[in-house]
Amino acid sequence: MINWQANVLPKQFNHRLNGFKKQINPPLILTCGFIVLIVLGTGLLLLPVASVQSLSFMQAFFTAASAVTVTGLVVVDTGTVLTTFGQSVVMVLIQIGGIGFMTLAVISFLTMGKNLGLKQRLLASQAFDTSDLNGVIHIAKCVVLYSLIIESIAFLLLFINWIDKYSVTQAAYQSLFYTISAFNNAGFALHSDSLIAFKGDAATNFIISGLFIVGGIGFTVLIDIYQQRRWSKLSTNTQLVLIATAIINSCAFLLIFLFESSNPATLASLPFDEQILAAWFQAVTPRTAGFNTLAISELTADSTLLTLLLMIIGGGSVSTASGIKIGTFIILLLAMYSYLRHKPQVTVFNRQLSDKLVIKALSVLVLYLFTVFLSIMVISKIEQASLLDITFETISALSTVGLSRDFTGSLSTPSQVVIILLMLIGRVGPLTFAYCFTKPKLQTLKFPETSIQIG
């Protein structure tokens, strides 16, 4: 595979690449792409055939935005208000939003027999978070192929499991909808109580949770696993994501079980085997699936706080999940550890992380927290609601999780606009969204160092 990074490119090509970067703003184009999808989805959902009762513009706009950003927050009940056509529109928007419209664009170009030019490769590289302009085609193909394979397997498993509960047609339709929604970490459900009715169904719990865990670890990780197939050959990023996912999920499961085992509104009233299933599902869904088998508003304060933390962390990069991402969380922990141990560099697995990478991770966290607190203040001025409900809704939207404390439906129009903006920022990424309004500026001068007191 050819490496197109700037330090190995011919000067003539390098100059051309820099010229294209000045002409276009890839983050802005990516963001506008999601906005166009939202507008198109809104138009389709406003059609009379899309719902059993006429949707207002804001209801259709909010639903389309939630689907494209694979969030799952809803202001109308998907299963009862939307018709089969409307639900199908939501499914398509979820699928495109999950794998990314840039992936779809690349595949469409290839299908029509067209070659990707430098501008198209540059845009795709931004979407896939890679500097390898030649590898974007391979990544796009793998994203589509892996999605189809994983979703097909899960669809068959769900269909077999639900064939006794529904008619053949209904079992197939339900399996398709939940497969797409789960793998893309959307959290849209055809039941008004999400998956609470299935909290004792082991197969449903593990198939759905397996889907959004796999979808949330990142396509680059899946590609690396398939290509290398041995732990020792996996990249540092893949190893860290897999280890962190296992640790976070395991700790979250134990803590949720501990916090809720004496809560009669959640686990205490269930048989032990259902307690295990419900605790597991509720532990892994905040990263950023949006389904729930326990009533979110009935969780203890400890579980609610843990859920907020899990929503902030989110899933892997180049995945169907959002949040600050696992990689960012790991880098911040490693940087803190290195500083406490007075290490001159941040290292992991005998590899050194660049200062630029650490600063990028810190920037993502700062932008995320700034956006959260600003949004909380705005919504608090608009809504007469508890600070916990507002905070939970805000973080759920920005992390594109979709969990709610039964608060979404009561939001006023201005608050819905704020939530829609948060979902969009969360899907494209706070840092990418910030790049829409900034231009790169090369620093040619080196200034003398100074010191500011911190800590």
Image (tube, grey):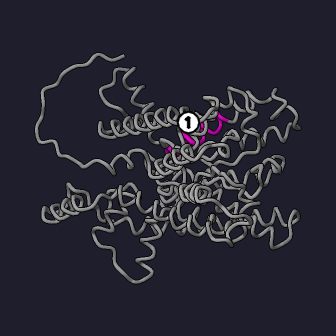
Look at label 1 and name its amino acid: Ile
Q: Residues within 10 Å of mark 1 (few under 14, many from 20)?
A: some
Image position of 123 (left or right of 205): left
- In this view, 440 is above or below 126: above
Q: Overall secondary structure of the magenta stretch?
A: helix
Query: Position of 392 compared to 10: left or right?
Result: right
Which residue is more in the foreground, 110 or 423?
A: 423
Question: What residue is at 45 percent from the left and 80 percent from the top?
Answer: 111
Q: Is residue 334 visible?
A: yes
**Residue visible at 29% across and 16% down in the picture:** 453
In screen coordinates, is 251 left or right of 374? right
Q: Would residue 242 be visible to someone looking at this image?
A: no
* Residue in front for this viewpoint, 193 or 385: 385
Residue 119 horizontal/vertical position (percent) = 29, 67
Residue 345 or residue 185, whichever sits in front: 185
The residue that appears at 48% across and 62% down in the rendered structure is 100
Numbered disc total: 1
Q: Which residues are magenta?
A: 239-252
Residue 312 percent coordinates (x, y): 53, 38
Task: Tell me the residue that label 1 is attached to.
Answer: 382
- Residue closest to the far left: 445
Q: Quadrant of the C terminus?
A: top left
**Dot 1: element:** helix
